[in-house]
Image: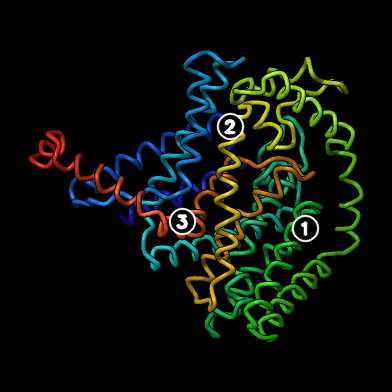
């Protein structure tokens, strides 16, 4: 399964480096790549007799949400069938991607390797962001023109989108480090992997991102106090924070403060955000059951706009309200189911009496997607496809792993389906070949 794991990591990295994976060409590459990786996994399944299929607990609510979108598109309960079909294909590709990740990453050693990849990749992207900040020439990657403008940082057109990535990259090295689950000879390297993303986040001048990381640090402090792990681990985290602030000071405090002040006029204003939220809520009230169709907000919003400024509104800047407007109560219930799994599993992670290294990784994985509850409703924009994909991926090791151990029905269904397939005529013919 190692080739499958490498391919999945490559798709994750591609989504980030391709400016968040929002353009048509990047979506096409991702969907095609998922199909090719699925064929590769099928070869392993047939040739190497991998009989057990893992069904993680996060798939049922996501699958139910996909069923809502399928119903909208198939029965023409959408205001823009083409847009709904495009978003539905992306959603199905994400579901297949998560399914493949659940099959490929099963052991603790597999996840150890992935966490090292996540830390190295987060360090690399943050380093590129800092370097671009210091040598910015008005272009992405120093060569690509931005036709529609933006406030770029790193590979993202919007600095808030980079902040969302940094929020997810920081807990991976920081949680094991603060909890004291890192070997002494590796502490400097892991500390460096935490330092650069924190410094890049501050340089991005994203208010929502900085507040979110502050909440994460308070959460870690509370975990240490509850576990009575001792003050030496808090000292380790304090050293990392002081080093990050020193890095920002070395680059230039005045430059960062001026960036905070000058960029506010370039973003969507507060009254415009309020108008978009109000419009999204009115759309939901007019289409309460199934919404207007997945991906149709840009098409439906103009009649509901109350503060016209001549600009196209493609998203509500609040993913909760946008989901309700596009999928109604049906999609909202699926999202509530997903969030409930996330919250309950996060609380369970705090009940472990002794935090081992595996538990520290699981806690880091749980903290990474918990930002989903904050960021979609914050003032810092919306999540990119690559962000959601990373959060769901980490749920496979965090909350999903705990729930999978509890709900044995998933194993029964998976083994029964695998047994039927292995005894089928198709399988026998493939095996004969």
User: How is colour applied across the structure in the image?
Assistant: rainbow
Looking at the image, residue 239 sits to the left or right of residue 420; the answer is right
Between discs 1 and 3, the one toward the N terminus: 1
* Residue at the disc numbered 3: 403
**Place of residue 159 in the rendered image (x, y in percent of width and height, measured from the top left):** 74, 47
Q: Which of 231 and 242 lies nearest the eye of the viewer?
A: 231
Q: Position of residue 87 (x, y in %)?
A: 54, 28
Distance of label 1 from label 3 (alpha carbons): 31 Å
Position of residue 236 relative to residue 147, above or below, is below
**Residue at x-position 55% and y-position 60%:** 365
| SS assignment at label 1 | helix
Q: Which numbered dot is residue 385?
A: none
Residue at 30% across, 45% down: 413
Which residue, given by chain and number where applicable, does mark 2 sit on? 331
Q: Secondary structure at mark 2?
A: helix
Question: Which residue is denoted by mark 1 in the rendering?
Answer: 210
């Amino acid at each position: 399964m190692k080739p499958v794991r490498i391919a999945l990591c490559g798709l994750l990295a591609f989504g980030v480096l391709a400016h968040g994976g929002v353009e048509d060409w990047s979506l096409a590459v991702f969907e095609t790549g998922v199909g090719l990786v699925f064929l590769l996994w099928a070869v392993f399944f047939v040739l190497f007799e991998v009989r057990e299929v893992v069904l993680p607990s996060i798939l049922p609510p996501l699958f139910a949400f996909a069923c809502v979108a399928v119903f909208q598109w198939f029965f023409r309960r959408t205001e823009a069938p083409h847009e709904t079909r495009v978003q539905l294909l992306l959603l199905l590709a994400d579901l297949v991607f998560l399914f493949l990740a659940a099959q490929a990453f099963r052991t603790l050693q597999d996840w150890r390797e992935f966490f090292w990849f996540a830390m190295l990749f987060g360090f690399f992207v943050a380093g590129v962001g800092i370097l671009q900040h210091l040598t910015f020439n008005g272009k992405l990657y120093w060569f690509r023109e931005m036709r529609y403008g933006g406030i770029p940082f790193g590979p993202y057109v919007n600095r808030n989108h980079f902040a969302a990535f940094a929020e997810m990259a920081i807990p991976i090295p920081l949680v094991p480090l603060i909890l004291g689950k890192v070997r002494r000879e590796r502490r400097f390297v892991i500390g460096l992997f935490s330092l650069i993303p924190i410094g890049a986040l501050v340089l991005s001048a994203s208010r929502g991102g900085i507040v979110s990381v502050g909440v994460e640090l308070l959460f870690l402090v509370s975990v240490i106090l509850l576990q009575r792990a001792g003050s030496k681990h808090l000292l380790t985290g304090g050293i990392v924070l002081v080093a990050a602030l020193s890095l920002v000071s070395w680059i230039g405090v005045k430059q960062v403060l001026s960036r905070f002040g000058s960029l506010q006029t370039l973003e969507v204003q507060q009254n415009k955000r309020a108008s978009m939220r109000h419009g999204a809520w009115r759309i939901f009230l007019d289409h309460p059951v199934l919404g207007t169709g997945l991906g149709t907000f840009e098409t439906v919003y103009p009649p509901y706009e109350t503060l016209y400024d001549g600009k196209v509104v493609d998203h509500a800047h609040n993913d909760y309200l946008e989901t309700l407007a596009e999928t109604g109560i049906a999609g909202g219930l699926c999202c509530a189911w997903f969030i409930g799994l996330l919250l309950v599993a996060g609380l369970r992670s705090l009940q472990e009496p002794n935090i081992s290294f595996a538990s520290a990784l699981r806690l880091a994985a749980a903290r990474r997607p918990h930002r989903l509850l904050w960021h979609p409703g914050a003032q810092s924009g919306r999540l990119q496809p690559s962000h959601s994909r990373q959060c769901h991926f980490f749920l496979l090791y965090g909350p999903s792993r705990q729930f999978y151990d509890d709900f044995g029905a998933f194993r029964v269904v998976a083994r029964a389906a695998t047994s039927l397939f292995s005894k089928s005529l198709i399988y026998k013919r493939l095996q004969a070949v």
